[in-house]
Image (cartoon, grey):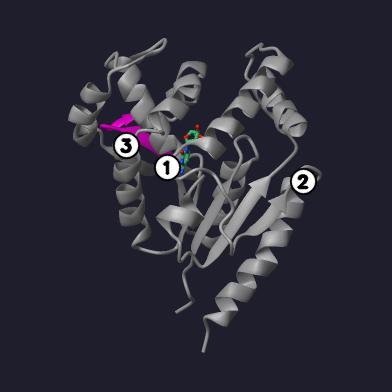
Amino acid sequence: MEKRLIIAIDGYSSCGKSTFARMIARELNYIFIDSGAMYRAVTLYCIRRKFISGQGLNTRGILEELKDINIDFIYNPDINTHETFMNSENVEAEIRNMEVTSYVSRISQIPEVRARMVELQRQIGAFKGIVMDGRDIGTVVFPDADLKIFMTAAADIRARRRYDELKAKGINIDFEEIKRGIIARDIADENRDISPLRRADDAIVLDNSRMTVDAQMQWVREIIEKKINAGRN
Ligand code: DC
């Protein structure tokens, strides 16, 4: 049987990691896991329970209920991909809203939240044949991943893509505000105490500032083929 890989895709926010990971998973018929969606789902739970608001954070409340937050990724054949469920509710759209986005960095800094998410991520990965994107997948979650890619792109370009994406959805937001948000998240991701964003020593860097999605796919196909063939005997 063909070797099934664990593929870790880390990098800065709004680099197109999820789009890329999702496409790879589709081609290989692998499971796609958006680990950021897991932190977003926990954040949504905390907002609803009023554990987070403004500058306030009820860490005790969060820790007490952490075990009650179940996260699943369920395949939707209509859109040919997995969607995020929290306690059996499809939260795929809601976890992308501005409120969740603005609080998620703070929730993802809580050590116990990270420990729980990493545990869940490893359970899912135990089956192999998985593409997971995030910030610490190649460094912490799967240090032995078969393929590690570290994605980056210029902040201006990332902001432009995000701006176009939101505009297409009818959401009007100032370009400069988006850019500031992206830069702030880069700083938060790189400077948090636990599992900060950094490139694993054995990760391949992909700067997609000037690459189309097709070009990225072509690039990764060759690499994956080599990895799979190397596993054949
Ligand atoms: O990729 P994203 O923007 O959906 O991620 C949301 C947040 O979760 C982001 O602030 C960083 C955090 N995150 C993390 O700390 N570790 C991961 N493996 C994935 C995301």
Name the front one of labels 2 and 3: 3
- Work out how far the residue at label 3 is from the one at label 1, CA to CA, in angstroms: 11 Å
Q: Is residue 217 above or below residue 108?
A: below
Q: Which mark is residue 212?
A: 2
Q: Is residue 10 above or below residue 170?
A: below
Q: Nearer the viewer, residue 71 or 168?
A: 71
Pointer 2 and pointer 3: residues touching (CB < 8 Å)? no
- Along the polypeptide, which appears first: circle 1 or circle 2? 1
Across the whole image, how many numbered discs are drawn on residues? 3
Q: Residue at x 60, y 36 (%)?
A: 13
- Work out how far the residue at label 2 is from the one at label 3, CA to CA, in angstroms: 35 Å
Q: Residues within 10 Å of mark 1 (few under 14, many from 20)?
A: some
The secondary structure type at the circle numbered 2 is loop
Q: Which residues are magenta?
A: 83-90
How far across and how far down the image is residue 182, in percent? Answer: 63, 27
The residue beneath circle 3 is 113
How far across and how far down the image is residue 155, in percent? Answer: 72, 32
Q: Which mark is residue 148?
A: none
Q: Which mark is residue 194?
A: 1
What amino acid does circle 2 point to?
Thr
Quadrant of the image occupied by residue 205: bottom right
How far across and how far down the image is residue 161, in percent? Answer: 71, 30
The secondary structure type at the circle numbered 3 is helix
- Work out how far the residue at label 1 is from the one at label 2, CA to CA, in angstroms: 33 Å
What amino acid does circle 1 point to?
Ile
- Along the polypeptide, which appears first: circle 2 or circle 3? 3
